[in-house]
Image (spheres, rainbow, N blue to C red):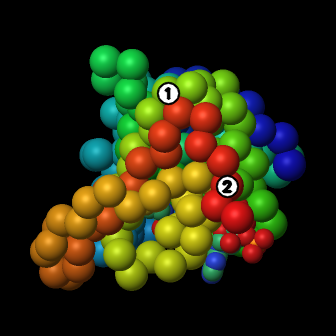
Amino acid sequence: MIAQPLTPVDEEAVVRAVHGPGGIGISPAFNWPEAALRPEARFQPGWGVWEGPRLAAFLFWRENGGEFEISVLATHPEFRRRGAMRLLLQRVIDAHSQKIWRLEVHEDNAAAIALYRQLGFQKIARRARYYRDGGAALLMERAPGAREPG
Ligand SMILES: CC(C)(COP(=O)(O)OP(=O)(O)OC[C@H]1O[C@@H](n2cnc3c(N)ncnc32)[C@H](O)[C@@H]1OP(=O)(O)O)[C@@H](O)C(=O)NCCC(=O)NCCS
């Protein structure tokens, strides 16, 4: 697995990973139709993990006033549970580890929440009825220099 920055050239690979056959798809916890995904891939900073020519995992973030917010992240189903997303998150956070990192996650998304906690994110707020299935969002934040919880 190779982790490296994504460029606008990788837009089609990102769209394929989500909307191609056997791809990540859309769910209440991951609601990224193509029209919303393309601008992320084109304009926001991001990193990807490649398995040969295939994009196994990707994430994009935004920087606002020195704070970083992860807007979208996902691993293709064929490549899950191999450490791809941990590797990606670790790489981008390490590059800006003295900044505040934030993200939102569906409160039923146990896999993602477990991963974020490993990387030092903690819940700071809960937004009821945030997702289209009525589920709540957890707003999670990683303080500058935070370590993995014991
Ligand atoms: C959440 C997601 C990104 C994890 O990606 P991944 O590449 O499979 O994650 P990793 O292999 O790096 O896993 C790292 C850790 O996360 C946790 N984790 C990942 N998948 C898990 C699962 N299915 N169940 C429980 N814990 C899980 C584990 O703690 C894991 O460490 P371990 O394998 O040593 O136990 C992936 O499941 C996904 O793309 N889900 C759909 C999209 C999504 O929910 N995006 C997040 C929106 S906020």
Where is residue 27 drawn, in percent x and y? 36, 74
Indicate whether 41 appears above or below 57: above
Q: For residue 99, which numbered disc appears in the image?
A: 1
Q: For residue 148, which numbered disc appears in the image?
A: 2
Give the farthest residue toward the top. Answer: 65
Indicate whether 149 appears above or below 64: below
Residue drawn at 61 percent across, 30 percent down: 97
* Residue 31 shown left or right of residue 75 in the figure: left
- Badge 2 density bin: few <14, some 14–19, many ≥20, Cα 10 Å: few
Q: Secondary structure at mark 1?
A: loop
Where is residue 104 drawn, in percent x and y? 35, 56
Residue 25 shows in the view: yes
* Residue 36 shown left or right of residue 101 in the figure: left
First in sequence: mark 2 vs mark 1: 1
- Badge 1 density bin: few <14, some 14–19, many ≥20, Cα 10 Å: some
Corner quadrant of residue 25: bottom left
Location of the C terminus (image quadrant): bottom right
Where is residue 87 drawn, in percent x and y? 75, 48
Residue drawn at 77 percent across, 61 percent down: 83
Residue drawn at 69 percent across, 43 percent down: 90
Residue drawn at 49 percent across, 45 percent down: 142
